[in-house]
Image (cartoon, coloured by chain):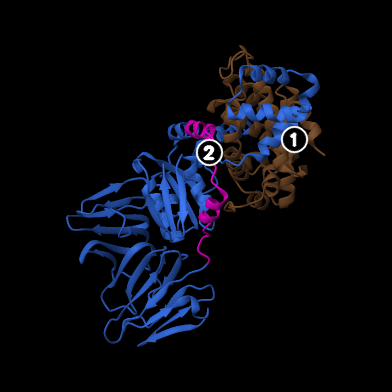
Amino acid sequence: MNGNSDIRALLQERLRGDLSPERQQAFHTLLHDQERQEELRAALEELMSEEQTILQAHRSIWTQHIEAILSLDRDITRPLTVSRPKVIAIPWVRAVAAAVLILGIAMWWLTRFQLRQEAPAQQLAINIPAPTGNHATLTLAGGRQLVLDTAANGGTLATQGSAQVSKTADGQITYHAPEKASGPVVYNTLTNPRGSQVISITLADGSRVWLNAGSSLTYPASWPDNARNVSVNGEAYFEVAKDIARPFSVSKTSGGKEAVRINVLGTNFNVNAYEDETTIRVTLLQGAVKVSSDINGHLLQPGQQLRISPNGTQQIAATVDLDEVMAWKNGRFQFDGVDMQTLMRQISRWYDVEVQYEGKFNPADYAFVGNIRRTENMAKVLHILELGGVHFRAEGRKLIVLP
Amino acid sequence: MSDTPKHTDDRTLFSRIAEGEEWAYRELYHRYGKMLFPFLLKLTGAKHAADDLIQETMLRVWLNRDQLSDVDHPRAWIHRIASNLALNWLRRNTVHEQAVEHTFRSGTTAEEDPLSNLTVQAIRTVVQQTLDSMPPQRRLIYRMHRDQGKRTVEIAEELGISVSTVKNTLITAARTIREQVAKAGYTLPIWLLALFF
């Protein structure tokens, strides 16, 4: 082995943590060998630039280090205060130093194990690309179904009474209707299937709703006089136009019964209410909402999330990571200690795969941290879980999870 | 302030950091912190060591910011610094009999312990003296930008000068501070200068 590749080999052994005593000695000798410092540095730099793993952690872990540096050359005749970061300071962000410490060590520990090599054939099977377009359908009140991706952008899709629904230049749905409905209220349903990109719809009052994959929204084609009621299934983000005369409400039914009703006054909030999620989550970003379910009601403050369990009991989480809640709308997967099953359900909706668990393990034992674009191939997302010690096998559109 | 564009490239960040823009520095710190941490953690075997090395590296980026516009390859530049610091660390902390344990040499130099209280105090003193002896306009612009958090356009308007004058002044101020800090012995190693090609 020539000198240079041995330098590289020693460094790699050091990185893996499996230097034998003799190799440790060779490493030590190398470190203090004047002649080889330049080669050593070059090899280290090379390995550094080849490193693929990225720390997944909240930005706040660096805050103290950064502020310490920035405060060094401020003018101290002015009292030293930590300057506000120039991005909008979000009050609910908390330093998570302790959690990241554990994660940091866990990651190191995990990378020490040889990851099981997937056979090339398996890799191909897991290569499922992210949805390339939106495949939503609009079911009009009479039952007629419009498949939206075949309709031209910028054209009218349908006319219902005095309301007109059309597709904008960038593929989103919008309504043009007179302010008040004339005639009976008719309901349409916008369905965004699994394996489909996020779609948004602008309603007759200017309210806008974004739908995640595997979700649907039922709404009136134009608003009646006194109220604006819609119902939702799956995950949706609402920006509701203010109209004091006509309160806006969002409901979700489950098993024929209303599981939750959200009463809104001009505001922005996210609803996560998939049938296959046990807990319904309503997160308020701006404004005010009152959330009622069977047993009780709660008034939410911005930044709060309400969790409703199947029996209707409600629980408020005072601080949630809004980035995590809204990640889907911003084209990302973001998870911060999410359990494996919840994560796998998100993956199954976006990539439209069926998830099955095989072998003996308790999925609840695993928790994952990650932030990755939703445009990535599924294999890349799964790689994050593989780092956490989970394995996968794909059979067509079935994804098998193994310990 | 302008929102940080999510994917500003490194060279643009370097140019903004040279002008003393803190948001750009924070963005760079996050970006490289995330990339360097796993590698440094594996190399050193200790989280605090990885954190320290990142901070030492990024400290040099900030204190050397007046030169950043001339750097053609930010990533390589940062990696060069980090590698050198990491090697220094390894030399100090690797004992040949022990594969994993690390012993720390007693006594610290400014280089080893990037921001011990003594070092912070000392650097701040030098900075303060430097600022005190700066021409008044330069000091004023610097304070408006760093302490009052005013944007360069605001400063330019308030003082009736051009934005480029403000930016150049900030770069000059940073350079003066760096030179004085180096002169006082809190030096960035000479090898750093050889990087500018």
Element assignment for label 1: helix
Residue B103 or residue A62, whichever sits in front: B103
Relative to A285, residue A222 above or below: below
Label 1 to label 2: alpha-carbon separation: 48 Å
Viewer-nearest residue: A240 or A15: A15
Residue A267 vertical position relative to residue B121 in the rendered view, above or below? below
- In the picture of the structure, the residue carrying the numbered disc 1 is B175
**Considering only vertical position in the picture, is A228 above or below A339?**
below
Q: Are marks 1 and 2 in contact (CB under 8 Å)?
A: no
Chain B shade in the render: brown
Q: Assess whether residue B169 is covered by the magenta stretch.
A: no
Residue at the image position 52 percent from the left and 33 percent from the top = A113
Q: Position of residue A115 (x, y in %)?
A: 53, 38
Q: Residue at x 38, y 71 (%)?
A: A191
Q: Residue at x 60, y 34 (%)?
A: B39
Image quadrant assignment for residue A93: top left
Give the camera-side residue of A252 and A16. A16
Chain painted in blue in the figure = A
Chain letter of mark 2 equals A
Quadrant location, the N terminus of chain A: top right
Q: What amino acid is at disc 2?
A: Leu
The magenta stretch is A105-132
The residue that mark 2 highlights is A115
Label 2: few (<14), some (14–19) or many (≥20) C-alpha neighbours in 10 Å: some
